Image (cartoon, coloured by chain):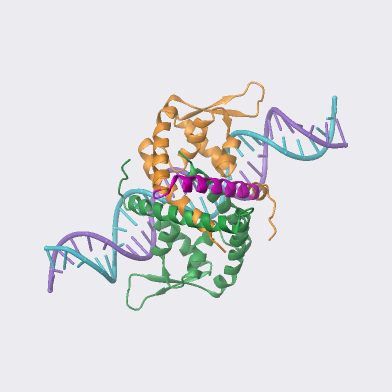
Chain colours: A green, B orange, C purple, D cyan
DNA sequence: ATATTTTTGTTGCAAATACAATAATATTAA
DNA sequence: TTAATATTATTGTATTTGCAACAAAAATAT
């Protein structure tokens, strides 16, 4: 069995760890950059969707986003037609650090892809997207309380 | 910029989350399966090396491994020649659940690679290993307190 | 129209995570 | 050989994480 998931886990933990260390400089604590990026990219998105996008527990997302709000990086706005949801928007402060997060992420991507040809980059992105689509089905299934059989 | 790291993060979180849910059945709490697998694969390995392999903070590994020991999955043995290190070995109990962990991981790998040809599997493994090698250099650098410049 | 189910959000609690600091041995340099 | 540095392991503390349980609104079924 080709252990691709082990490689993926190692890469993810290593780079998340680096990012968390580097973003302390901008007063972002562990994990917060993930949420802020998604909210900047999709202003008006709701919390539930953010959790789904980054594949994190709903309650974890809830608390991270609450903290982002308390620290003035984002704001929650009520929706006119739907009293249940709260739309999320970056504040000026949030928008201002977004480029720094992008810059860091771009650098990490560049480091990760060092020595890769253009074609190899295309290939790995395509293959990873397919893996992600395969995997997110199971994630949603299991998160809803279902049991995989194997 | 091709966002391969975003895909990798999503995949890693999704599958780690699934594994943690599935391994509760074997009385393994969050993250523990990672350590147990490595110790089963390399009996006699020391804690510091395990942390390096899975790319997790040394102190996190220390506590996870201590808990594995307390729960009877592994044991620590003193080394004859080196008083500083403690070698790690799976107990009978640990060895017994190892195949179940493998089985789960194999299933997740299979799900992840659904629709892939043999050649694509070879390719993605090769590319991911290269990414991992690129990335682990930076991780060690930053973890030692150094600052990346970009 | 009413009942049921799903979606969205929150909080209590227990546990994992990681930074900082400390200690002890081992390794390397002077 | 002694001094300086690196490696390995541990603990204190603060924070994050996620399951369980709950509540309220919305969507769907009867």
Check if residue A57 falls in the magenta segment.
no
The image quadrant that residue A61 belongs to is bottom left
Report the residue that reaches farthest toward the bottom: A80
In which quadrant will I find the C terminus of chain B? bottom right
Using residue D2 as the reference point, say whether residue B5 is left or right of it: left
Point 38% across, 52% down: residue? A139
Point 49% across, 69% down: residue? A41
Please name whichever residue, B61 or B96, is drawn nearer the observer in this view of the structure: B96
D9 is higher (above) or lower (below) than B6: above
Point 41% across, 38% down: residue? B28
A142 is higher (above) or lower (below) than D27: above
Residue B62 seen in the figure: yes
Using residue C18 as the reference point, say whether residue A150 is left or right of it: left
Point 44% across, 28% down: residue? B95
Residue B120 picture location, percent across and down: 47, 48
Residue A99 picture location, percent across and down: 60, 69
Report the residue that reaches farthest toward the top: B80
Please name whichever residue, B16 or A28, is drawn nearer the observer in this view of the structure: B16
In which quadrant will I find the N terminus of chain B? bottom right
Q: Magenta span covers which residues?
A: B114-138
Residue B20 seen in the figure: no
Q: Main secondary structure of the magenta part?
A: helix
Check if residue B118 falls in the magenta segment.
yes
Residue B110 picture location, percent across and down: 40, 44
B24 is higher (above) or lower (below) than A87: above
Please name whichever residue, D13 or A65, is drawn nearer the observer in this view of the structure: A65
Using residue B130 as the reference point, say whether residue C5 is left or right of it: left
Residue D20 picture location, percent across and down: 32, 49
């Amino acid at each position: 069995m080709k252990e691709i998931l082990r490689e993926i886990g190692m890469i993810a933990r290593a780079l998340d760890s680096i990012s968390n260390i580097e973003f302390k400089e901008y007063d972002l604590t562990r994990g917060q950059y993930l949420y802020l990026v998604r909210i900047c990219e999709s202003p008006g998105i709701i919390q539930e969707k953010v959790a789904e996008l980054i594949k994190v527990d709903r309650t974890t997302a809830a608390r991270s986003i609450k903290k982002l709000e308390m620290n003035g990086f984002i704001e929650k706005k009520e929706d006119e037609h739907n009293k249940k949801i709260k739309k999320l928007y970056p504040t000026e402060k949030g928008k201002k650090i977004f480029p720094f997060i992008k810059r860091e992420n771009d650098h990490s991507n560049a480091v990760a892809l060092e020595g890769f040809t253009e074609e190899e980059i295309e290939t790995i992105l395509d293959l990873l997207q397919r893996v992600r689509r395969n995997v997110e089905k199971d994630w949603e299934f299991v998160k809803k309380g279902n049991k995989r059989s194997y």
